[in-house]
Amino acid sequence: MSIKLSKFVKSVSLLSVLAIALAGCGSKPAPAPTPDANAGKKPAETTTAANSLEQIKKAGKIRVGLMGTYAPYNFLNDKHEIDGFDADVAKAVSKRLGVQVEFITGEFSGLIEGLQKDKYDALVSQVTITEDRKKTMDFSTPYVKNAVNVIVKSDNTTIQKLEDFKGKKIGVGLGTNDEKYLRDVAMPKVGTFEIATYNDVITSLKDLNVGRIDATINNVFAIKPLIEKNQFKVKAVGDPIKEDFAGIAIRKNNPELLDAINKALAEMKTDGTFKEIFQKWFGVDPNF
């Protein structure tokens, strides 16, 4: 075989090997697509939400988010246990769901985000029912009505009503419905004033007591035990500036869980449990 012919045969052989290799790659069937586990289903958040009641019962507990710093609604007692009106309501509801309650505390400004991120199954922490919040979460039937008053130092004679806020420094809980009320309703109505936000009620009352702020707004039921315990020289003035209803908040699209909670609350009102809890913490009959 001549040198040229030998080179030609080698070239053909090499091309043949490459052709076979390429043919092998091309003939190999493409891997079958991985089945979409969510095909034909609702978005993941909705699917998870729809199974919440079942998951809670399977776990044997319901994770309840609350502040733990808002006596008499929810706070740490002398035994370092979560106590208060909200806590007792949550315990009674969980009992009727057939599960234990696990309390998880956090600042109010982060509770709603924590609910959306599945840190909690429900919030029982004086979460006011509003149209805006209904867009991102579902609420039970109301379990308490709260009247909100203007709170000032005992010797203050210049602030008697909401209209007196103009030019003053007003304290309020961060992320609360009261903060939204001050920004969206009060300020456009009465004129510009400074808003100081707080992560807990006790700090706002301390600042009010020493004059760092001119006033705050809050539920009288909530601040009464703090005032008495700390001997703050503050007072409520005028008529309530607004009334709110609080409900148990859960993630949206939870029909089974929502129905179960509403059923539990209805039973508590019928059998006297709710009245007993209300009288225990406020000394009066339920206010609605």
Image (cartoon, rainbow, N blue to C red):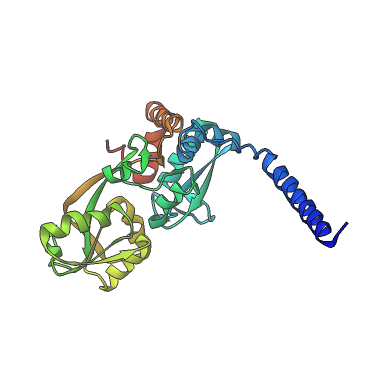
Residue 33 place in picture, x, y as percent: 60, 38
Residue 233 vs residue 254, the one in the foreground: 254
Identity of the residue drawn at 64% across and 40% down: 30
Q: Is residue 12 above or below residue 235?
A: above
Q: x, y percentage for residue 213?
A: 25, 70
Q: Vertically, is 274 above or below 241? A: above
Number of marks drawn = 0
Residue visible at 75% across and 45% down in the picture? 20
Q: Specify the quadrant of the image occupied by residue 158.
A: bottom left
Height in image: 44 above or below 169?
above
**Residue 249 is drawn in which quadrant?**
top left
Q: Which quadrant would the C terminus be assigned to in this image? A: top left
Residue at coordinates 14% horizontally, 66% vertically from top-left?
A: 192
The answer to whether residue 221 is left or right of residue 52 is: left
Q: Say whether residue 56 is left or right of residue 230.
A: right
* Of the pair 119 and 158, the residue shown nearer to us: 119
Specify whether residue 161 is in view. no
- Name of the residue lying farthest toward the front: 2
Image coordinates for residue 244, horizontal then vertical, percent: 26, 45
Q: Residue at x 46, y 56 (%)?
A: 106
In this picture, is 70 found above or below 23?
A: below
Q: Quadrant of the N terminus?
A: bottom right
Front in this rendered view, residue 51 or 257: 51
Residue 206 x, y percent position in the rendering:
33, 68
Q: Viewed as shown, does residue 90 lie left or right of 30?
A: left
Furthest toward the right, the residue is: 1
Q: Is residue 23 visible?
A: yes
